[in-house]
Amino acid sequence: MAWYGPIVPGRAGILAPGPAVTPLQFILTILLLLCTPGPTNTLMALGGYARGWAKALPLVGGELGGYLLVIVPVATLAAPFFEAYPQAYMVAKIAAVLWVLYLGIRLWASTKKADDDSAEISLRQVFITTVLNPKALIIALVIMPHGDLMILTPWLLLFAGLVLLAANGWIMFGRLMRGIRGFEIQPVVIRRVAAACLLLFAIILASSSIQSLA
């Protein structure tokens, strides 16, 4: 099985149809994106560190819901719009920069005690961060097939399974960091490191946005 139709960046920023993609290529590409460090994965790892694996599992629903909220309408309806108006993609990236910047500053300035860490990373934060994560638009525009829901359904189910796998991996990574014998970091340090990562991501996103305007 393969499809033609995802739009990818072409010359002069124009979006053009991409090549056929097989299910194996789809799986490998999605896993590569989902396993790449980013704002959502930072929150998932921090949630695993603060809550433990079982209590952090609800955060996976926020990540999956955020991705689907972007991917489904873009892949079924909005792809032609983004093709005709590349500026809309720029607006989405700017919104992502502002949200990640806000989240990083808020996390850095947090004064919550260790006992309150389980409430530090909320499902709402993960959901909004994922909606604004540029990965969602990349997946929707470049990797997912475009068409009606009948065409998308099997690929969305496969994508959901990959999100569950990758999200659990990041949660377990955070949990294992806390479980290493002799390895203990104060919660405030974890928050500051995660905040620094988010601020770095915001700078990278802003830089790429400025370069695309040049």
Image (cartoon, rainbow, N blue to C red):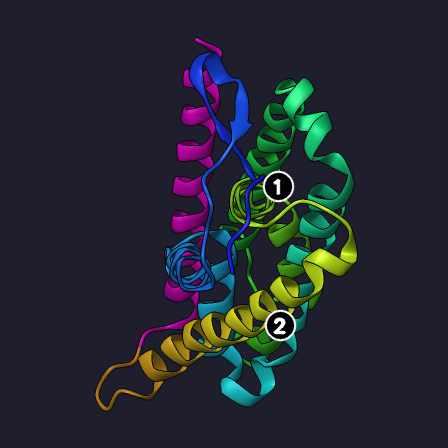
Point out the residue furthest to the front here: 1
- Establish if 154 lies above or below 95: below
**On the image, numbered disc 2 is attached to which residue?**
59
Residue appearing at x 77%, y 56% in the figure:
149
For marks 1 and 2, the one nearer the N-term is: 2
- The tag on residue 99 is 1
What amino acid type is highlighted by mark number 2? Answer: Leu
- Establish if 150 lies above or below 148: below
What amino acid type is highlighted by mark number 1? Answer: Trp
Quadrant position of residue 6: top right
Q: Residue 138 appears at what percent x and percent y?
A: 53, 42
Q: Residue 21 appears at what percent x and percent y?
A: 46, 51
Residue appearing at x 41%, y 81% in the figure:
172
Q: Residue 16 appears at what percent x and percent y?
A: 53, 26
- Spatial CA distance of label 1 from label 2 is 18 Å
Q: Is mark 1 on a helix, strand or loop?
A: helix
In magenta, the rendered stretch is 185-214
- Establish if 74 lies above or below 72: above
Number of other residues with Cα within 10 Å of mark 1, as a class: few under 14, some 14 to 19, many 20 or more: some
